Image (cartoon, coloured by chain):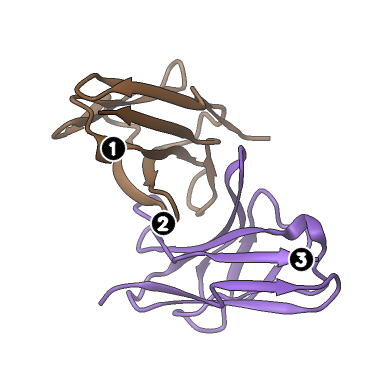
Amino acid sequence: EAQVTQNPRYLITVTGKKLTVTCSQNMNHEYMSWYRQDPGLGLRQIYYSMNVEVTDKGDVPEGYKVSRKEKRNFPLILESPSPNQTSLYFCASSSTSEGEQFFGPGTRLTVL
Amino acid sequence: GENVEQHPSTLSVQEGDSAVIKCTYSDSASNYFPWYKQELGKRPQLIIDIRSNVGEKKDQRIAVTLNKTAKHFSLHITETQPEDSAVYFCAASIGTGGFKTIFGAGTRLFVKA
């Protein structure tokens, strides 16, 4: 089954404790992206990747890191999480730069 | 910076009525304009999209119109049904050749039976 998976689905952590949210897709898509969703703000792009080892900043990259060492995986790293990073995070992938994005199930992160 | 504005933020209609959601964008280089539907507790899913070389596109009860000159695009849902109740997001591609995407803030649509 074609899908985008994220882990963990729920995470409660404390300020400053490094964490990684994994994202994997099995559709051989070149393009992948991370978004955060906050009430009233819609989906805001954090980082995106156009291929292995090619990444770029989205609208709200501060406090986040990404890497794309393999085509199927695009982890999101929070080196020192803060409470304002409490949010719902979605990973997405696409076969083209201007085409349908397939979203993962989301990761709800709470930073205390 | 680039942005996409979406209105209204909340829309309530009677079953069978039409619903219209409007978006404006700022980047004149935008070429791709998708619409996503997000049901409660679920992930966003594409319902329709339009490219800059087309003025209108229709898929059953859903249609999207694009006015590139005015930088407006709209989603039209006819004969609304309770299952259309969800949050709808418009989006625009930013620049060319990349994967930068700006989403609107969303419209919560309620369809009353």
SS category of the residue bearing label 1: helix
Residue marked by disc 3: A111
Could you tell me residue B76's position as x and y percent? 28, 25
Are the residues flagged by discs 3 and 2 from a single subunit?
no
Nearest the viewer among B2 and B110 is: B110
Residue at x-position 82% and y-position 63%: A82
- Quadrant for the C terminus of chain A, please: bottom right
State whether residue A4 is above or below residue B106: below
Q: How many neighbours does mark 1 have within 10 angstroms: few (below 14), some (14-19), or many (20 or more)?
A: some
Q: In what element is the residue under mark 2? A: loop
User: In front here: A59 or A17?
Assistant: A17
Chain given the colour purple? A
Q: Chain in brown?
A: B
Query: The numbered mark 2 sits on a residue in which chain?
Result: B
Is residue A77 shown above or below A90? below
Q: CA distance from mark 3 to mark 1?
A: 34 Å
Numbered circle sitting on residue B3:
none
Q: Amino acid at mark 1?
A: Asp
Going from N to C along the chain, the mark reached first, 1 or 2, is 2
Q: Which residue is mark 1?
A: B84
